[in-house]
Amino acid sequence: MSDIDFSSFDALTFDCYGTLIDWERGILNALQPVLAPHAVEADEGELLERYAEHEAALEAGEYRPYREILALSLRGLCADLGVTPSENDVAEFSDSVGLWPAFPDSAAALRRLAERFRLGVITNCDDDLFARSNRRLGVDFDWIISAQTARSYKPSLNTFEVAFSTIDVPRESILHVAQSLYHDHVPAKQLGMSTVWINRRHDRSGFGATPAARATPDVTVPDLRTFAGLTAERVRRGA
């Protein structure tokens, strides 16, 4: 954890899935009814890593809605495992985002942060799917920049450029808060942003549902509750 002057920022932008919503648990829960009948022998870490390879490759290509990304990622993962999903399996998995749980600390931390900062979200999702997730978070974001709006997926720099053109706050006054080094910290740092790493996987090995990446965030904390407390403390101290 490094020193940072939180009082110099007017807005916080968040990644959603992995940072606010527990997408790894959501993905695994949605995979369970697809794979269980086939007695697939793969641990959770392997499933997440295989899934991440397919999703990241698809998102790097020509833009398509996130529901299609989910469907094709499932088909790719199942092909790796020698399983053929039914059309119903694919449809239910593609619509499962609204069922993915929020992390237990997300809603309260966001409410606390909203007392001091304006809040935005930059998310690799369709608008309607994010709206369902947002109901689990209990806050009204000042700005929502989706992949559907940007017509691109993080780590594309275009997604962040669309965010900058949408958010009526100078770029240097925006602090980006995210879990994924690959999707968020690498591109944000390329664009000169200050970032906070919510290292939700601090007690687990590997990168889970995100491809491996290296970046140097300005602040690292294990969860959103810790981040909200840290900002309150440092703003109070004027640090």
Image (cartoon, helix red, strand yellow):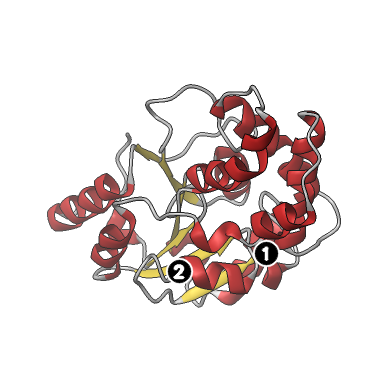
The relative height of residue 179 versus residue 165 in the rendered view (above or below) is: above
Label 2 sits on a secondary structure element that is: helix
Q: What's the CA distance linking mark 1 and mark 2?
A: 15 Å
According to the picture, the residue beneath numbered tag 1 turns out to be: 147
Q: Which residue is drawn at the image coordinates 49% and 55% (left, top)?
A: 100
User: Residue 134 shows which numbered tag?
Assistant: 2
- Out of 150 and 98, give the one closest to the viewer: 98
Which residue is at the front of the view, 53 or 177? 53
Rendered image: mark on residue 121: none
Question: Where does residue 164 sit, x and y in percent of width and height?
Answer: 59, 68
From this viewpoint, which residue is outermost toward the left? 237
- Residue 154 as seen in the image, left or right of residue 16: right
Q: Earlier in the sequence, mark 1 or mark 2?
A: 2
Amino acid type, residue under disc 1 in the picture: Ala
Residue at image point 24% right, 70% down: 115
Choose top left, top right, bottom left or bottom right for residue 32. Answer: top right
Determine contact: label 1, label 2, CB under 8 Å. Answer: no
- Placement of 235 over or under 138, stated as above or below: above
Say which amino acid is labelled 2.
Asn
State the residue in front, 150 or 205: 205
Place of residue 219 in the rendered image (x, y in percent of width and height, measured from the top left): 37, 40
Looking at this rendering, what residue extends furthest in the front direction?
Answer: 37
Residue in the image at 65% along x and 28% along y: 39
